[in-house]
Amino acid sequence: MQRGIAAGGRVFELIDTTPVIRSKPGAVEKNSFESGLEFRNVSFAYQPGGKTLRNVGFSLPKGTSVALVGPSGGGKSTIADLLTRFYDPSEGSVLIDGTDIRDCTVESLRQHLGIVTQESILFNDTVFNNIAFGDPDATPEQVERAARIANAHEFIIRTDDGYGTNIGDRGTRLSGGQRQRLAIARAVYKNPPILILDEATSALDTESEKLVQEALGNLMQGRTTVVIAHRLSTIQSADQILVIQNGEIVERGNHEELLEVTNGVYRKLSQLQAI
Ligand code: ATP
């Protein structure tokens, strides 16, 4: 009983936590995504007085992709976090179809977003429930379709109970590549028009890498994508590349254009990483 009471206390504490970012009074429901996204003169600091992002500005028309590249700690993940409204800018604004995202309700904004990161949270539950992720109306056909697009169906049906297999705490019974493909299947299932992708840097074997890469390609098709990119193929095929260093966009263009910049950061990075 004592253990139960203590555990219950922790659960209620979590349920009662108010999020830092909330919809402001009068915020509108953003029910569709029409033309694109824009960062307009965005600056941001985690601590007062600091400057994690400085005057970041770019437009992302609907259906196109932007790759964020640059040295570690430059601010790439922070840009993604501002789009999802995990934080709000200190200056400037992030716009969706020309409307400041702070004027939209948080829930309606997030329904347009799909996020696949290196640490996508998988639950100690079945494969089916991890893909359908809280949709009580999910059908086996829909879930299987998403798994096939994510190159996950083959490995799933080889497990003991197929879609009914429990994947263990945070997916520990799966390999790294399998976990990633399951996270991709979840994003395919949700079918959001905007995708935020933090590509994994962790090494996968060649076969697994190829499957993940293919799955990501399928997922990105026709979507507006912000990708924190590490892979050559993703970077090369992006419509625009932003090189982020010390919180600023220091170079922008496509792969070919940036390779032409004498003494350019991208050119150096690409030589270092042989991209
Ligand atoms: P990486 O390629 O290593 O993931 P990044 O370019 O995505 O790096 P960010 O994660 O956006 O960089 O971090 C930018 C800066 O902000 C770093 O100096 C980092 O230490 C700092 N930072 C990131 N998250 C927080 C946080 N929650 N609180 C305080 N500082 C943070």
Image (cartoon, rainbow, N blue to C red):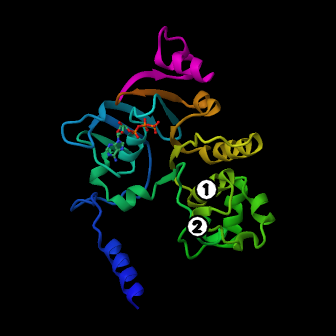
The magenta span reads 248-275
Whole-angstrom CA distance, mark 1 to mark 2, is: 22 Å
Instruction: Answer yes or no: is residue 98 visible.
Output: no
Q: Nearer the viewer, mark 1 or mark 2?
A: 2
Q: Quadrant of residue 136?
A: bottom right
User: Where, by quadrant of the figure, is residue 174 drawn?
Assistant: bottom right
Image quadrant of ligand 1?
A: top left
Disc assigned to residue 109: none
The amino acid beneath tag 1 is Val
* Label 1 residue SS: helix
Looking at the rendered structure, the kind of residue marked 2 is Asp
Query: Residue 62, image x and y in percent?
Result: 48, 41
The number of numbered badges drawn on the structure is 2
> Which quarter of the figure is the N terminus placed in?
bottom left
x and y percentages locating residue 163 in the rendered image: 71, 70
What residue would you read off at disc 2?
169
Q: Is residue 229 visible?
A: yes
Q: Is residue 269 left or right of residue 80?
A: right
Relative image position of residue 79 (x, y in whole percent): 39, 40
Which of these two is toward me, 118 or 233? 118
- 178 on left or right of 196: right
- 230 shown above or below 122: above
Looking at the picture, how far across and down is residue 107, in whole percent?
38, 62
Q: Which residue is mark 1?
A: 188
